[in-house]
Amino acid sequence: MACIAKSLTAVLFRQRGLFNHGMQAPIFQRAFAAEAKPETKISHDTKYEYLIVGVKGEKQNVGLIQLNRPRAFNSLCSPLIAELCQAVEKFELDDSIGAIVLTGSERVFAAGADIKEMQHREFPNVYKNDFLGSWDKLAKCRKPTIAAVNGYALGGGCEVAMMCDIIYAGEKASFGQPEINLGTIPGAGGTQRLVRAIGKSKAMELVLTGDKMSAAEAEKAGLVSKVFPVDQLVNESIKLAEKISSHSRVASMMCKDAVNTSFEVGLTEGLKFEKRLFHSTFATADRKEGMTAFLEKRPPKYTD
């Protein structure tokens, strides 16, 4: 059993690029000891058809993506998802961005996948082309992501919100997986992420009835972190993103990786993975700077 556990841990680290192939030693020391590369600055002036994208925050370190398909209640058609993946990737590559906020309008976050687009599709087509397969780009983003949900987040909209690391909601927000009303089931994580967020019983109730959950209920159940007045939601989400961005970027990524791994492995392997990441921080300049700044009673200046 010990050999199996050791092997599983090694697999987890290789999947995340933390081990050098053929070796059982972390590559952090070599990676962070290397000469610092200049920051990558990406232009976000791309004109999108279904998104409004910008950089926010006092230090311009927060990426803001707004879904903008108002006539269709921000329904998630394939072109919109393609644009969302592109915008997320550009923010992920931009070293000046520490966190990303995803929002919709005050009336609706996203009302779900585009039913007109799906209506006449058939099994061979959706199976061969892995329909909805590209949606996971947001979930795989290594930088912290925050969903700022006003209004309806239903079906695919709820699934996209759950792909983010943190959900803030406006007072009038509502969440649900109403696919059962259309003779189908959630296909982008609704049956998987929802149960992990609110438990089996509540998740079953939502997916089997198609009922909606209010913002207050979602906060109580653990799906939402905090609830704000509608007109304050986006600003509060940006403030949170700014606070996250003020910390070490590499440490933030490690925190996110460790928490997400807890959903994939047992406690023993999760604790082992966390400990190895913790040890790896000692190969970073940011860990040394953070502790030194604390002892010297000054703000840290992170560089990794």
Image (cartoon, grey):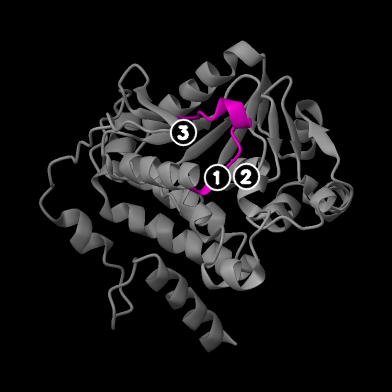
Q: Which mark is residue 259?
A: none
Q: Which mark is residue 77?
A: 1
Report the label total: 3
16 or 218: nearer the viewer: 218
Q: Secondary structure at mark 3?
A: loop
83 or 254: nearer the viewer: 83
Pointer 1 and pointer 3: residues touching (CB < 8 Å)? yes
Q: Amino acid at mark 1?
A: Cys
Tell me which numbered mark, 2 or 3, is placed earlier along the sequence. 3
- Image coordinates of residue 31 in percent, x first then y, are 21, 59
Distance (Cα) linking label 2 and label 1:
5 Å
Q: Give the labeled residue for mark 2.
A: 114
Which residue extends farthest front? 120
Q: Amino acid at mark 3?
A: Tyr
Q: Residues within 10 Å of mark 1 (few under 14, many from 20)?
A: some
Q: Is residue 207 magenta?
A: no
Q: Is residue 12 above or below residue 55?
A: below
Tell me if 271 is positioned left or right of 137 in this view.
right
Q: Give the labeled residue for mark 3.
A: 50
Q: Residues within 10 Å of mark 2 (few under 14, many from 20)?
A: some
Tell me which numbered mark, 2 or 1, is placed earlier along the sequence. 1
Residue name at image x 49 percent, y 39 percent: 145
Residue 217 position by quadrant: top right
Q: Which residues are magenta?
A: 65-78
Q: Secondary structure at mark 2?
A: loop
Residue name at image x 62 percent, y 19 percent: 106
Distance (Cα) linking label 2 and label 3:
13 Å
- Image coordinates of residue 215 in percent, x first then y, are 75, 28
Q: Amino acid at mark 2?
A: Asp
